[in-house]
Image: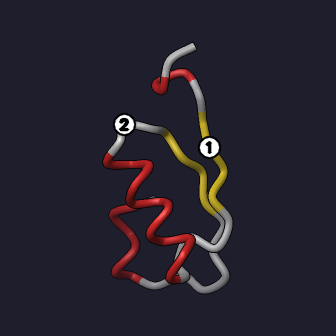
């Protein structure tokens, strides 16, 4: 399986650490699903 076939769950994607992980994975070509504590519009492009 390659990156395009796998989905990674990132918890806390609007936090400092979770957000950094989510951005890094997306830039690396991974597909992610993310959990959010608080929805903030500036993160809309990550969803």
In the displayed structure, does residue 1 sit left or right of residue 28?
A: right
Look at the numbered disc 1 and give the secondary structure of its residue. Answer: strand
- Residue at horizontal 66 percent and vertical 51 percent from the top: 9
Q: Quadrant of the C terminus?
A: bottom left
Query: How many marks do you count on the picture?
Result: 2
Q: Residue 18 placed where, x, y %?
A: 56, 70
- Residue at horizontal 33 percent and vertical 63 percent from the top: 45
Q: Residue 25 placed where, x, y %?
A: 44, 49
For the residue pair 1 and 35, the one nearer the viewer reads as 1
Asked if residue 26 is positioned above or below residue 17 in the image, the reply reads above
**Residue 8: image tag:** 1
Tell me the crowding category of disc 1: few under 14, some 14 to 19, or many 20 or more residues within 10 angstroms, Cα based: few
- The residues bearing labels 1 and 2 have C-alpha atoms spaced at a distance of 11 Å
Which numbered disc flags the more N-terminal residue, 1 or 2? 1
For the residue pair 27 and 31, the one nearer the viewer reads as 27
- Residue at horizontal 48 percent and vertical 71 percent from the top: 19
In the displayed structure, does residue 30 sit left or right of residue 5?
A: left
Q: In which image quadrant can residue 36 be found?
A: bottom right
Q: Residue 26 placed where, x, y %?
A: 39, 48
Look at the numbered disc 2 and give the secondary structure of its residue. Answer: loop
Colouring convention used in this rendered image of the protein: secondary structure
Q: Residue 43 placed where, x, y %?
A: 40, 74
Can you identify the residue that label 2 sits on? Answer: 29
Q: Quadrant of the N terminus?
A: top right
- Residue at horizontal 62 percent and vertical 43 percent from the top: 8
**Residue farthest toward the top in the current orientation of the protein:** 1
Check whether the beta carbons of the residues at disc 1 and disc 2 lie within 8 A of each other. no
Asked if residue 6 is positioned above or below residue 14 in the image, the reply reads above
Q: In which image quadrant can residue 7 be found?
A: top right
**Residue 30: image tag:** none
Tell me the crowding category of disc 2: few under 14, some 14 to 19, or many 20 or more residues within 10 angstroms, Cα based: few
For the residue pair 46 and 15, the one nearer the viewer reads as 15
């Amino acid at each position: 399986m390659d990156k395009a076939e796998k989905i990674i769950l990132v918890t806390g994607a609007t936090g400092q650490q979770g957000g950094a992980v989510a951005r890094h994975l997306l830039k690396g070509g991974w597909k992610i699903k993310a959990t959010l504590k608080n929805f903030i519009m500036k993160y809309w492009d990550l969803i």
